[in-house]
Amino acid sequence: MIRYAGRSILVAGALLAGQSIFAAGIDGQVLDDVAAPITGAMVTLTRADGLYSETVYSNNKGVFHLDTKLEGKLMLRARAPRFADSQQTIDVSAKSAAKADFKMRRLTAPNELSDGETGSAQFKRLKFKSEKQKQDFQNDCLSCHQIGNERTRRALPKEYWNVTVERMLGFVGSSDKQTLADYVELLSTAFDGKPYVVEQSTDVAPETLRAKITEWKLPGAIIAHDGEVNPKDGRFYLVDGDAVFITDPVTNKTETVPVPALNIPLGGNFPAMGLPIPIGMNQSRHGMHSLQYGPDGLFYITSALGGTITSFDPKSREFKDYPVGGSRVFLQKTLGAVT
């Protein structure tokens, strides 16, 4: 998912300047179950194919206004901390304004409140032996994985955690048995299936209430990383697995450009190195992770599985692979890197 909010939306806004941006308006109010206004509720309008959405916030009177170019029968959803989500189908037309009100149920059951807690709140469940263990765990695990999601917050046997943690540690090249045992004990003790609720502030900054969030869902992507804007065509470029995704913020359409094999086997170089292949990457060769726009107009992409740097020409759609290791001449010539 690509998201742009606040000042970042200026990138798309500049591209749309001079055009007829808004075709329809949606007005409404978000109230709780005793008819009190909810401040800062997120109200999201989603296109029928689910690949594009627009979000605004309700103000201190619970009122929201959303200008949109979308038309037809669309899904409108309201979300707020400590409230059950609410959604409805709305018929949007450019010829008339639309009205949509929400009445949201306040959560009171401990299990509902616990399931709605943020990842940072769920992280508080973990009782570390020391600050060093906490820092090591964050480095080893949280750089790629989320704590307290729907799967991990359930009560799971130690056997499950052993397999999962061993895989995570394998990604960072660690085979220390004591670290493995400590992490398994830490996680299996913390996530015992019981509700966990902490006090968190739900205050909303005034600037947030004026924001509009535009989101583009990338078709077929799992975990897209580190988007870049091409200054020459104004499109957003992201990578995931073995594909480059190019999103046009004017048409709100995404083009998927598959990366050729480039002599990289399935699983990349992980099997040859004795490392576990990340979940869902068995059919991937490159495991594209991030990209950087270069001064030569090409994108340079890290191939996490293949162990290479891959260049991509946004004009010709051509790819070229460069093995990593040895001389730094390639990076110095193309990116000006001297580190």
Image (tube, grey):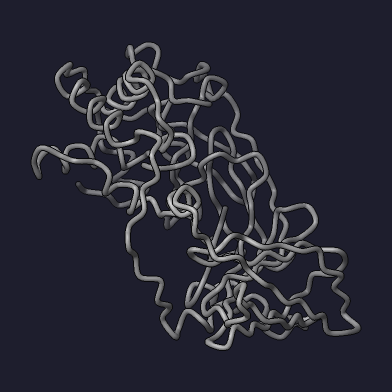
Figure check: 212 above or below 297: below
Which residue corresponds to the image point at 47% horizontal and 77% vertical from the top-left? 7
Q: Is residue 188 left or right of residue 246?
A: left
Instruction: Residue 10: give x, y in percent of width and height.
Output: 54, 77
Which residue corresponds to the image point at 70% horizontal and 53% vertical from the top-left? 51
Quarter of the image where one finds residue 94: bottom right
Figure check: 196 above or below 304: below
- Please tell me which residue lies in front, 187 or 192: 192
Instruction: Residue 199: give x, y in percent of width and height.
Output: 32, 63
Q: Is residue 145 left or right of residue 80?
A: left
Instruction: Residue 67: give x, y in percent of width and height.
Output: 72, 80
- Please tell me which residue lies in front, 27 or 283: 27
Q: Is residue 65 left or right of residue 299?
A: right
Residue at the far right: name it. 95
Quarter of the image where one finds residue 9: bottom right
Instruction: Residue 220: give x, y in percent of width and height.
Output: 65, 39
Q: Is residue 273 left or right of residue 82?
A: left
- Please tell me which residue lies in front, 83 or 60: 83
Which residue corresponds to the image point at 33% horizontal and 46% vertical from the top-left? 333
- Please tell me which residue lies in front, 54 or 88: 88
Figure check: 109 above or below 328: below
Please state the total of marks drawn on the protein image: 0
Figure check: 50 above or below 137: below
